[in-house]
Structures are given as C-alpha cells and as structure tokens.
Image (spheres, rainbow, N blue to C red):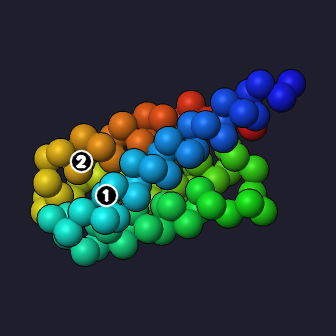
Amino acid sequence: MAAPLIDNETKIRNAMYMLLTIINDTGVPRNIRRAATEALNQLRNAKLSPGVRAANAVSILDSISQDPNMPINTRTKIWQIIAILETVRD
C-alpha cells in the first residue's frame, strides 16, 4: 500500500523540480512563470491528496500550454510535467 504513495510523491517532487527550472528561467515570459509558480504552490499544498494536487497543477499548466509567447523548450517541459502529473492517482 505504501509503494504507490512513495511513487506519487516522487512524481510530484520531479514535477516540482521541473517547475522550478521554468520559474527561475528569466527567458520565460512573466505570465508563464507566474502560472508555473501557481502550479508549484498547488503541488506543495499538503492539505490535499496527491491526486488532487496533481490535478489542480495540470489544470493550471494546461491553461497556459498554448500561450503563443511561450518558448518551444518551455512548452515541451510543461507537456512533460503534465504527462508526469497525469499518472498520479490517489
């Protein structure tokens, strides 16, 4: 029973690390960094279950993933984060 929980936390940690690289990249437009920060805050919310935290973050990231001002490498990274978080289940 504990193995999926550890697995979920590992996936969330990986996603958080990737979000931090976007947040700290000054070449990424401010609105995209702000959304990445919001998604990171959702992932850090210990009051919610891992699945809910991941779903909230995916919702935020999905809404900005089509921003035309987003650098291509950042869009790819956001899609990777979404793919990781979509595998998180309660």
- As drawn, the label of residue 75 is 2
Determine the residue positioned at 36% across, 72% down.
34
Q: Quadrant of the C terminus?
A: top right
Pick the residue in front: 58 or 74: 74
Q: Residues within 10 Å of mark 1 (few under 14, many from 20)?
A: many
Identified by mark 1, the residue type is Ile
- Position in image of residue 39 (x %, y %): 49, 61
- Position in image of residue 83 (x %, y %): 43, 34
Dividing the picture into quadrants, the one containing residue 42 is: bottom right
Identified by mark 2, the residue type is Arg
- Work out how far the residue at label 1 is from the one at label 2, CA to CA, in angstroms: 10 Å
Q: Label 1: which residue?
A: 22
Determine the residue positioned at 40% across, 58% down.
20
Is 11 placed above or below 3 here? below
Q: What SS does tag 2 mark?
A: helix
Is 37 placed above or below 73 here? below
- Position in image of residue 87 (x %, y %): 56, 31
> In this view of the protein, can residue 1 be seen by the observer?
yes
